Image (cartoon, grey):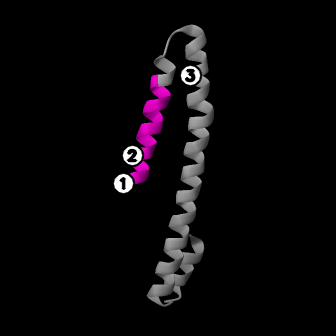
Amino acid sequence: MRGIARMVEEDKYCIDILTQVAAVNKALHAVSMGLLEEHISHCVVGAAQESQASGNDDAVQEKVQEATAAIGRLLR
């Protein structure tokens, strides 16, 4: 981000700045997808395993809602 701000301050060519913005967006999207995958594979699966043992699926529903909300934010 600092690099992009520096490019703007130095009045670099707009297309070059936009190219860097696109690269940052792509990198952030990749990080977001990785975090979401981790959440689903650990938190949701863990809650499902606990639910199976306890017979209470409240934790599973909560984790699924969290994941659904996160997906919604990513798609905006």
The front one of 16 and 49 is 49
Residue marked by disc 3: 48
Circle 2 is placed at which residue position?
A: 72
Judge by depth and name the residue closer to the eye, 37 or 10: 37
- x then y, percent, for residue 23: 55, 72
Residue type indicated by callout 2 = Gly
Residue type pointed to by label 1:
Arg
Residue range highlighted in magenta? 61-76
Which mark is nearer the camera, 3 or 2? 3
Disc nearer the start of the sequence (3/2) = 3
From mark 3 to mark 2, how far is it between C-alphas?
Answer: 22 Å
Give the answer, above or below, for where 45 lies relative to 71.
above
Are circles 2 and 1 on residues that touch, CB within 8 Å?
yes
- Dot 2: element: helix
From the viewer's perspective, is residue 14 above or below residue 52? below
Q: Is residue 34 left or right of residue 65?
A: right
Magenta stretch: includes residue 56: no
